[in-house]
Amino acid sequence: MSSDTSNQAISDDFSARYSEVRQTADVLVAELDLPHSHACFKDHFPGQPIVPGIIQLRWVFELAAAFIPNHQRYDVVGLKFTNVILPARPCTLTISRQDADRIAFRYTGTSVTYSSGMIHFRQQPDAAQIASGR
């Protein structure tokens, strides 16, 4: 999956709420606060609310800026949704820098991995790179 983040427009109501964030040079750990009232549960799905995958990615990008500012283009690789994130359940987002342009992320709960993947950030190409087809 590739994208240009400049085209994304999601309401601020969908921003993650964190009860705690810890960061070292290469690892960021955020404890998410996901009450039933969070906007991401509103219509996804009535009677069985879960955190949408696209919202999980958005939260990774919100925190990834601490490691890789000014990213506009990216590739998401190895994305796996293995369990659903339900309201009011323990949920931890861990982001680890792999190198200057790559991060790995993992959403976990008590004895469960919800999702994981890797994001490779690329700089926006300049005019010479576009003209040469790179």
Image (spheres, grey):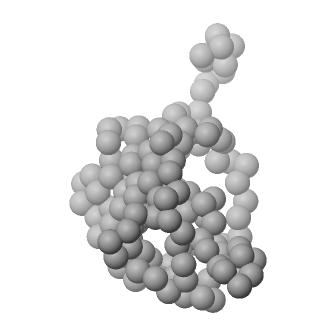
At 53% from the left and 34% from the top, the residue drawn is: 123
Q: Nearer the viewer, residue 45 or 73?
A: 45
- Which corner quadrant of the image does residue 48 belong to? bottom right
The number of numbered discs placed on residues in the rendered structure image is 0
Quick check: 84 above or below 26?
A: below
Figure quadrant of the C terminus = top right
At 51% from the left and 34% from the top, the residue drawn is: 122
In the image: residue 118, left or right of residue 72: left
Quick check: 28 above or below 49?
A: above
At 71% from the left and 76% from the top, the residue drawn is: 45
Quick check: 98 above or below 25?
A: above
Q: Position of residue 83 (x, y in %)?
A: 50, 65
Q: Position of residue 26 (x, y in %)?
A: 27, 52
User: In the rendered image, is residue 101 in sight?
Assistant: yes
Q: Position of residue 104 (x, y in %)?
A: 39, 48
Q: Position of residue 109 (x, y in %)?
A: 38, 73
Q: Nearer the viewer, residue 36 or 74?
A: 36
- Which corner quadrant of the image does residue 31 belong to? bottom left
At 61% from the left and 40% from the top, the residue drawn is: 1
Quick check: 84 above or below 5?
A: below
Tell which residue pokes out farthest to the left in this image.
24
In the image: residue 109, left or right of residue 7: left
Q: Nearer the viewer, residue 128 or 38?
A: 38
User: In the rendered image, is residue 39 in sight?
Assistant: no
